[in-house]
Amino acid sequence: MSRAELVIAWSRGWARSRGVPALVNIPGGLRLDIGRPGHRRRYVLHTWDPDYLREIGRNISTPGTWLKIDCAAEELSAALPPHWQMFETSYLMSAPLRPERVDVPPPYLLTVGADQSRVVTATIRDRSGETAASGRLAAAGGVGVIDQVETAPGHRRRGLGTAVIQALTDHAARQGVRLGILAATDDGRALYRTLGWTSHTELATAFIPEP
């Protein structure tokens, strides 16, 4: 897949995972009408030039608007006026999906299930039933998009994040999904690399704060 195709596929899977009802095609990318406090609307661009970014930056002033662009953070920051704030850069990654052995250290227990929209959630709980780690996977356009992989602070460095990723990729592969895509944080990127994921591009992010 090209970088543009990866960005589009990731955006569609992210929208399914987050329950965003519709995506709108715009020049160079997509618009997601999210409608949530602090995150009203999101623009995701895979194709752009500096003039286009400057035009977007000038013309959009609605608080709660986000931009996610296939570019370096420095390029996006240079194109935007002061009412935009930069946010953490993420990294678009992909990997072939194959059935996996899932290693969950005791005494933790893993459950994997899908909701009515067929978004898959992997949850690891401790012996008291509290959630120690979790993650989601949404199929879109023939790929599986992994989203919201999180480990609770008191349960980190025990391999639980790895187990969640293994569980999601195993489930997707057994359903016939052959390619996984995700957007990793800078910290998460190192973990995904050890699990065989390849980094393709930076996704620079900016937003207009909402009071």
Image (cartoon, grey):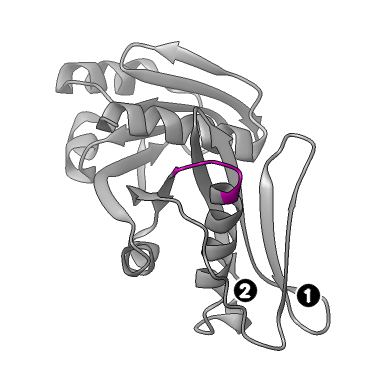
Q: Which residue is mark 2?
A: 152
| Residue 144 versus residue 187 in the image, above or below | above
> What range is drawn magenta here?
174-178
Quarter of the figure with the N terminus: top left
Q: Is residue 83 visible?
A: no
Q: Residue at x 71, y 38 (%)?
A: 118
The residue furthest right is 128
Which amino acid does the dot numbered 2 rest on? Ala
- Measured as percent of width and height from the top left, residue 11 is found at 46, 32
Give the distance between the C-alpha atoms of the residues marked 1 and 2, in whole angstroms. 10 Å
Image vertical order of residue 73 relative to residue 151, above or below: above
Quadrant in which residue 49 is drawn = top left
Above-or-below relation of 139 to 56:
below
* Residue 81 drawn above or below residue 195: above
- The reply to whether discs 1 and 2 touch (Cβ–Cβ < 8 Å) is yes
Q: Is residue 132 magenta?
A: no
- Residue for badge 1: 130
Q: Answer few, some or many: residues within 10 Å of disc 2's Cα (few below 14, many 20 plus, some between 14 and 19).
A: few
Q: Is residue 193 visible?
A: yes
Q: Residue 93, percent across and down?
A: 34, 49
Task: Give the x, y percent position of residue 184.
Answer: 39, 54
Q: How many marks?
A: 2
The secondary structure type at the circle numbered 2 is: loop
